[in-house]
Image (cartoon, grey):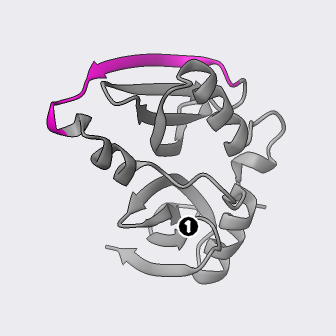
């Protein structure tokens, strides 16, 4: 059995993490989401902006509690609405993490996920998943479409 966060008791879903982010920053657009293993727990890192300030929220993935919050003024060029819209993630019809993991595990011969990143590349919202074998010797990066799960790229890291 692999160590998949959303299958562990008490780990909040990606949808819940996004909901918590928007409770803290309701006027923002979300531009990045990351889930990583930090020490004894998994941690969500969510980044967005409201057109004038960039906000970063780190959550304990088991409890949903904020671990760290920060805000920083955007540079003048980054305040342009077209740039903000271009970086906004498409959060509609996101596949759940369990389905993303299924696709990744069928594509590569390793089964220990390490990080999940949700980013926008051109007009497409992508999952970038890093997975390794049990001892960490074989590391792979896999890119998937976040809405339909289409496998876009696989790369073995040396």
Picture quarter with the C terminus: bottom left
The residue lying furthest to the right in this view is: 9
Span highlighted in magenta in the image: 64-77
Horizontal arrangement in the rendering, residue 79 relative to residue 84 (left or right): left
Query: Alpha-carbon neighbours of circle 1 within 10 Å: few (<14), some, or many (≥20)?
Result: some
In-front residue for pair 107/58: 58
Is residue 115 in the magenta section?
A: no
Q: Secondary structure at mark 1?
A: loop
Is 15 left, or right, of 150 in this rendering?
right
Question: Based on the displayed image, in which of its 4 quarters is residue 156 positioned?
Answer: bottom left
Q: Is residue 76 magenta?
A: yes
Q: Is residue 139 above or below residue 118?
A: below
Q: Where's residue 150, x and y in %?
A: 59, 80
Can residue 2 be seen from the camera position used here?
no
Q: Position of residue 134 (x, y in %)?
A: 59, 62
Q: Position of residue 146 (x, y in %)?
A: 58, 64
| Quarter of the image with the N terminus in it | bottom right
Position of residue 7 measured from the top left corner of the image (x, y, whole percent): 80, 50
| Residue located 15% across and 31% down the image | 76
Tell me what residue is drawn at x 56 percent, y 25 percent.
Answer: 26
């Amino acid at each position: 059995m692999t160590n998949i966060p959303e299958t562990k008791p008490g780990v909040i879903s990606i949808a819940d993490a996004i909901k918590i982010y928007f409770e803290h920053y309701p006027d923002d657009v979300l531009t990045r989401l990351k889930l990583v293993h930090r020490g004894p727990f998994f941690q969500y890192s969510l980044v967005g902006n409201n057109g004038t300030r960039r906000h970063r929220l780190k959550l304990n993935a088991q409890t949903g509690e904020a671990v760290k919050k920060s805000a920083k003024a955007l540079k003048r060029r980054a305040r342009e609405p077209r740039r903000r819209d271009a970086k906004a993630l498409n959060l509609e019809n996101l596949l759940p993490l369990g389905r993303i993991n299924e696709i990744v595990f069928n594509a590569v011969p390793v089964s220990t996920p390490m990080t999940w990143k949700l980013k926008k590349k051109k007009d497409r919202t992508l999952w970038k998943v890093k997975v390794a074998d049990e001892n960490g010797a074989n590391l792979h990066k896999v890119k998937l479409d976040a809405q339909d799960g289409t496998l876009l790229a696989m790369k073995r890291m040396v």
